[in-house]
Amino acid sequence: MSTRENSYTEAEALNLLAQLERILDLDPLIDEVGFIHPSQFATLKEEIVYKAAKHAFISALRQYKTPGNFSGKSQDDTLAIEVMIHSKALLLLSCDFATAWNSRKLIVSNKRLLPILMDELHLSALVLSYSPKSEQAWSHRRWVINMIARNCSTLQWIIERESELVEKIAEVLDELKKSRNWSGLHVADNSCFHYRRRLMLRNLEGFCYTQDNNSSGYFVETYQIWKEELDWNESLIKQYVGREALWLHRRFLSMYLIKHMATHLLAVSCQSKPKASVDIDIDSLMDHELCLVHSCSTTIADANFEDFQAQAIHSAAYMLWLTKQIPEYQGIDIQEKLRAGVGDVTRMLKRSCPDRSSLWDYLVGYHSEP
Amino acid sequence: MAVAIIKVVDIIKIIIIYLVQQPASPPVSHAHSHSLLLRSPSYSHGLSTSHSLSLTAVSPTSPSFLKNSTSASPNRRWLRLLLRRFPTSVKLRPSLKFWLKWLKKVIKFSFAVVKPLPLTSLLLHLEMGELAADKHVKYIISVEKKKDSFESVVMEHLRLNGAYWGLTTLDILGKLDAVDEEDVISWILKCQDESGGFAGNIGHDPHVLYTLSAVQVLALFDKVDILDADKVSNYIVGLQNEDGSFSGDIWGEVDTRFSYIAICCLSILQRLDKINVDKAVEYIVSCKNLDGGFGCTPGGESHAGQIFCCVGALAIAGALHHVDKDLLGWWLCERQVKSGGLNGRPEKLPDVCYSWWVLSSLIMIDRVHWINKDKLVKFILDCQDMENGGISDRPDDAVDVFHTYFGVAGLSLLEYPGLKPIDPAYALPVDVVNRIFFSKK
């Protein structure tokens, strides 16, 4: 490229940059950005605009950071505005340019006003609209929310006036109900089931705190929630065949139900009479689980469909999981029932999932130890 | 008669190919175990007795595949010569007796020297492609030189990470001398900020991510001592929080990745005693989930990348006993999907980078025999771009340096021939790590 061409494109670059920044400035409500598939020429332009944006940003930032002779308030403000404009343009071109996000954090932390913080949320949302995996954008958002939480203390004080525990519990149950529909439509999303597990654990924590007052009533309610979740999980398992996330969720649910509910039941029934109206029978629970596993395993005959095969493998692995998690004091009958099924299950697993045969062997060996 | 001869010769060919592609080595990752065991007693928690037996038999430098040869080229030559002498044509005149005698000798030899593999694995070896090492070297060097394309310009803020990925790959392939060492080192030093931390590129803000890469690259060139170790370690020490966690930079984001970085980096600089290690371990353990895995913060979903960071940090800190190895091993081995590749968490697609994170975690907790290693090797090799070099996240996608590094590093962990062994915790070649801890101070 000749020098004449160079200077032409430089001027053009600055012009393009100014155009981009004007657009952003004119319409602050832009909440989505999309890029047309770039042709060769367009890519060339992008690169030049990027370089111009970066250059503008760095010089503005350097000026802002160096303490000048005339550092009056107005001067600071204009420099800050420059940095904000240029960093915005730069971030739309290169959303993971951390130094640009940091410069915005620097300027915002000197002001700490709610509208400015909201602006930051807006910008990060804009970036995330076309680059949803941008780690820096998410990190910036977290930082901004922390700032809002820390600096808008009146909000917190208002919340804290209510009874803390009740508020927390009510929110958790509410959230469980609200997110159930979404979860039902996204059965392969492991994160959403992880979120539900966290909510349920939070709910359990709440139960532990209220152990003393009206424990049996609250206990029944908590148990109902867990039982409901198990039943809902079962309906999803039958509907969406072979989904790993559903089976992993079930591992967690049954393990917690058996381990923790059983101990609490023992504690409660010793304390108060009449006994809780719900009859928590671990035996029948296990019977039910074994039935479910059995019904899913028999579909292995339909080896043409990968989903059914996956269903059988997941249910078999689930059963091995149960055998490992059941504490010894649960009774001899259960142990025998489990042991009876384990042989078939292991054989089936080794046949259909030979890659993990070392794991299956190990687990069975562990189980058969007295 | 003629048909019988053809069949016999085909069997012989299969056995010869099998001998040629599978070097005689114990079925255990001895090279890795050796370095691990020497460095920190914590690793021995995970090592079973079979490992320690193999350690006495083999030293890390003796296995034949460590000899500096490109994957199988000398062996391929030998095979071609051999086959030329014994072509599969009906024109063969020697009697069946002669062939059977020779066959018997070959079988005896192979069973005596090599552990017999099941037929499926044998066939897998026949189907498997090769590692296009030279192509990958060329690809990495071209990426290093290409600084002006839009793709590289947009990635310039993490160039130091890219340097680590590219240069470590070159070292594993035995071609670190293909780059100008002085050029690289002088550029890295320019990335250092006055706080002591390193930025992703000249003029950018410092962060622990790039600080670790800088120290790792200097370690590759055995130039860690040109750093002011106290200055760099003070930067990291200043980022430890009260609960033992680490922030990534002055802006305060907390993540277990940063705990790993801090512990790994300080360990290489031999300043690990400057932080509160017990508190750091306590924080990591608080991020352990019910499925045995680890998240980015307490209660965070288990993810293979985070698990690598937590397990690696605990390993270096000598605290692996906090890990439930059976439970975590189970979760990790369930990451292997039908194609042989590994994913990062349930229901996700396989990706070559998890060949590193899941695999190194399994090795550190000594449960790597719970996955099918051959299938994983095949998956990684299928992700190569055989024409232009480089490795992509899954077969037929676009390549990049990041996945090239993880693919090659994964193959090294799987003891693919012709590659330097890599340490699963430090993510640096074993000889580099040994040099740090066992050479003159």
Image (cartoon, rainbow, N blue to C red):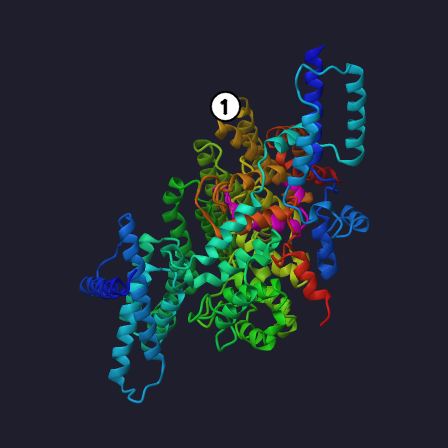
Residue designated by label 1: A304
Quadrant of residue A144 within the rendered picture: bottom left
The quadrant in which the C terminus of chain A is found is top right
Q: Residue lying furthest front in this view?
A: A2
On the picture, is B240 further left or further right than B116? left
| Residue located 38% across and 40% down the image | A185
Q: Give the range drawn in magenta.
A: B345-372
Q: Residue B309: x percent and y percent?
A: 57, 57
- Residue B176 seen by the camera: yes
- Residue A326 seen by the camera: no
Quadrant of residue B16 within the rendered picture: top right
Whether B333 is among the magenta residues is no
Identify which residue, A10 or B111, lies in the foreground.
A10
On the picture, is A368 further left or further right than B207? right
Quadrant of residue A103 within the rendered picture: bottom left
Q: Residue lying furthest top in this view?
A: B1
Q: Residue B91: x percent and y percent?
A: 68, 15
Q: Residue B57: x percent and y percent?
A: 81, 48
Q: How busy is the neighbourhood of tag 1: few (under 14 within 10 Å), some, or many (20 plus)?
A: few
| Residue located 57% across and 53% down the image | B169
Identify which residue, A148 or B329, lies in the foreground.
B329
The quadrant in which the N terminus of chain A is found is bottom left
